[in-house]
Amino acid sequence: MDRNSIEKRLNDQKDLLSNLVKKAKTNGIDQVEIYSSYGYSEDVSLEKNDLNNCTATEENMFGIRVIHEGNQGFIISNHIPSLYQSIEEAYSLAKSQSTPDFDLGLPEPESIQNHFNQYDESLDRMGIEDLVNSAKEALGWRNDLYSKVNIDSGDFSLSKGYKLIVSSKGVMAHELGAELSASVMGMGVDGDLVGSFDYDSASGFDKNQFQTLWKKAFMNFGDKCMGALYAKPISGFQGKVLLPPDAVYSFFLGLFIGSLNGTSLRKGKSKMAGKLGEKVASSLLSIWDDPTNNGLMGSTGFDREGLPTSKKSVLTEGVLNTYFYNTFEAKKAGLPKSNGSASGGAQSLPGCGPKQLQIAPGTSTKDEFFKLPGKTLFVNRISGTKDGASGDFSGVIKGGYLLENGEKVPVREVQIVGNAFEALNQIEAISKEGELLGESSFVPYLLLDGFTITGVTEE
Amino acid sequence: MRNLLKECLAEESGFVELRYHHKESRSFFAERGRVESTALRKRTGIGVRVLEAGTWGFASTSEISKSSIQNAIQVAKKAARLSSALRKDKIPNLPKANFAIGDFIGKGIEDFRNRTVEEKLKLVLDIQNAAAKQSTKLQSVGCGYSEIYEEKAIVTTDGADSFFSMIRPEFRVSAVAKEDGKMESGSHSIGVTGGWDCLFRSQSPTEISDEACKTAVDLLSSSLPDGGLSTVILSPSIVGLLVHEAIGHTVEADFVLSGSVAQGKIGHRVGSDLVTLCDSGYSEYYEGAGGSIPVDDEGIIPTNTVIIKNGILSSYLHNRETAERFGVAPTGSARAWEYGDVPLIRMRNTFLVPGDSSLEEMIANTKDGYYLDGAKNGQADATGEFMFAVQKAYRIQNGKITDLLKGVTVSGLAFDVLQNIDMVSKEFKWDLGSGHCGKGQPAKVDAGGPYVRTKVLLGGK
């Protein structure tokens, strides 16, 4: 499967979907939207420090949305010959409802300014043999450098495809993409000692970019597994936590960003309701969403509704600047149109959310955080739970360290409890350095104070 | 379908496995007085797995035709040959297995086909409307109903030849309550493998809704428990999470081979005498457990696998490959979420066998501790360290339940927690049927058991 054949398929499908939408209109179905997601991938998987499986998969999924007199029906299918029947089924689902909301409607088309070429044709010269070679190389790194690290699973993938949206309102947008990616999960094992599992991943638009990032990610994975191997229980304390970029993004930031979702706001489930223009976080924190930055993996010119994306400020020095809306939620909020923040893909209705968050770097050097006086808990990962409404979170620290008097002691059986909205004001410092997570979002280290840490040993 | 698959295999000599999978998922959700979403998801295709030159190759196709399937077989074979040179530990053979032969039609499927979309929409809308009127503190109540209908056919060159189908409905209510700027949420859900009557057998939709709303409102006046190592009585839903997360994952044979804490522990004491733990493809004690399967995704009839017998570790969970490596029979634990997924070793219905005590006696016998109820999520580690989140923690003082506290995260080391079990109740409940387990791909599972008393680390103030 190469770029030419994918482009041909895309062009054929544009015609097919346009004709289906026309046919639906002719038959009295006025508002139809079809979101198509096509992917071809070759994968090589690892298991138990060995190669496990080679796979080749190809699939085209379609998300079909029909709106009829304020009601909506949605069908997801991978069966091209019956797509028109699926439109009729979605129409039937919409008609069977009795609770219309006339703010519900497909958006009018808008001109898309940013067109990305995320398909490097050099990937067309690669195949499963190259993935097997990458797997062989990674197993070599494991044997030579991390013999106490067991690879539980891993995956190397070469994927190509497109997304396409067509609607009866005249929306028509598409993007091609191709990437190499890899991930690994495992743990340190030394005799009867077993460490916490950890993982890392990398992706790239071409072979060179991928290889550089993947080697770095694998070494990071190996170091994290080894670091967690000789962990000890500690006693609890009240104090500082240091979050590396992964933990900031995956656990801490998620609750706050979720509270800016237009749907949560409308339903009265967000603590950030009515706070636009107010200071809701430490002045140290500035966040923006920028899907328009060419060269990043998450960049895209249009959202789940086919409307143009744009750069927008979320927080400026702790002051809240925006919420995220799709077309329906924007109308419910009294806005003339959405801000291009419809999220999701073919297998979901349009939600509301950011595309590519960026956090402004701070002024501290991250190394300073590792030499602070007193106790600081370095939170590599939180295995836990979070509540979107209250903002409460709690969990077990994985691969963490107690930083004390310049020493770094790996810890286990340690829990942390907190509240994400309060934590926004508990930020004490932000590092200058950070990481481009998933080659998409820049995230620095965050130092926070005032947390309850629970351990199992007595002081 | 079985005939088409067998036709595709007629000229194959090595090991080839064909798995047809058609899946339809319907969901209806109401909130704030209206139907917020209705969706139908249909996905159909064939997963092709081959064992060639000592390694696996896999391909899939959504086109159900002889030529497309045969092409996928060739793609999978090519993939296997390409990888064979690198794989060190070749797979010599797959063991003989108790293959399912014939058609296995699940219970309750006609029941759901006979119920209209309008009936299901009315259910979520009526329950949501009634619930929202219960308290002025309720900001929002969401009610969802969903069902997954699946049919599969599995045919292999070494004898598997079956067609099976099943229906899995779920019902859930989530509520958010607000007072003086404080917000709390409560949720309650059920899920079964079976018909409509089976879904609402133990609790009506209204009772499920009442429980979710009451939790959200009650938590507004709760605070955090004291953190630390505590004596706890766990409800069946929490026991389900415990045995699934803390033990079940560590005994999946692929994870054992990677070095999980259960490696080398067969025959060793890992729990108190009161602990007998099983994972079954069937619904023990009563019908409807959400992870029940008539046939696994390697075409094998599943077993009731006794993992721990009276505190002694007695078995891991196996697919055909690991069964060969360990020299045992496959347990029928291979499962794939979609046709494009490779079958992995997964739990089905995991449970602790009931004991002799009653919940009443257990509370009366606890001087200082907590009663934990309402399973949220959970995760486990290779080390045996696990965490699970609970909705509600009730303080127990001098044999009586006192204050409601916010349930938080509970953690411990799996085998330590099992060793510390000192009371197990007579009562039994499946209570995790609306859950999905994640391990690279989702799987529908259930878990449950009696009430148990043990010690865990409770996160708190």
Image (tube, coloured by chain):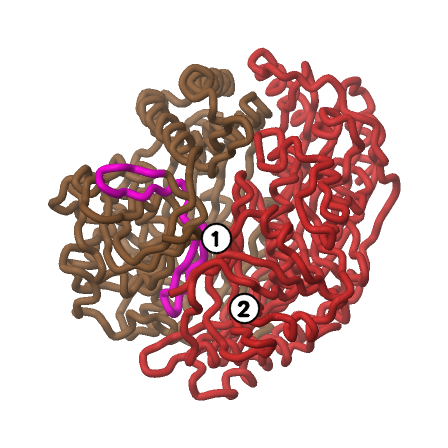
Q: Nearer the viewer, residue A316 or B384?
A: B384
A384 is within the stretch colored magenta: yes
Q: Nearer the viewer, mark 1 or mark 2?
A: 2
Residue type, numbered disc 1? Ile
Residue type, numbered disc 2? Gly
In the image, residue A74 sits, relative to residue B173, either above or below, namely above
Image location (x, y in percent) of residue B293: 76, 49
SS of the residue under disc 1: strand
In the image, residue A220 sits, relative to residue B368, either above or below, namely above
Q: Which residue is mark 2?
A: B369
Q: Which corner quadrant holds the N terminus of chain B?
A: top right
Chain ID, mark 1: A
Say which residue appears at 25% left-offset and 53% top-offset.
A240
Image location (x, y in percent) of residue B247: 63, 46
Chain ID, mark 2: B
Chain painted in brown in the figure = A
Q: As drawn, is B42 to the left or to the right of A61?
A: right
SS of the residue under disc 2: strand
Q: Which corner quadrant holds the C terminus of chain B?
A: bottom left
Image location (x, y in percent) of residue A378: 31, 45
Image location (x, y in percent) of residue A230: 43, 34
In the image, residue B30 sits, relative to residue A151, either above or below, namely below
Range of magenta residues: A383-409
Say which residue appears at 71% left-offset and 41% top-offset.
B313
Q: Chain B appears in which tint?
A: red
Say which residue appears at 52% left-offset and 73% top-offset.
B395
Which secondary structure dominates the residues rendered in magenta?
Answer: strand
Q: Which residue is mark 1?
A: A34
Label 2 near label 1: C-beta < 8 Å?
no
Disc 1 from disc 2: Cα separation: 55 Å
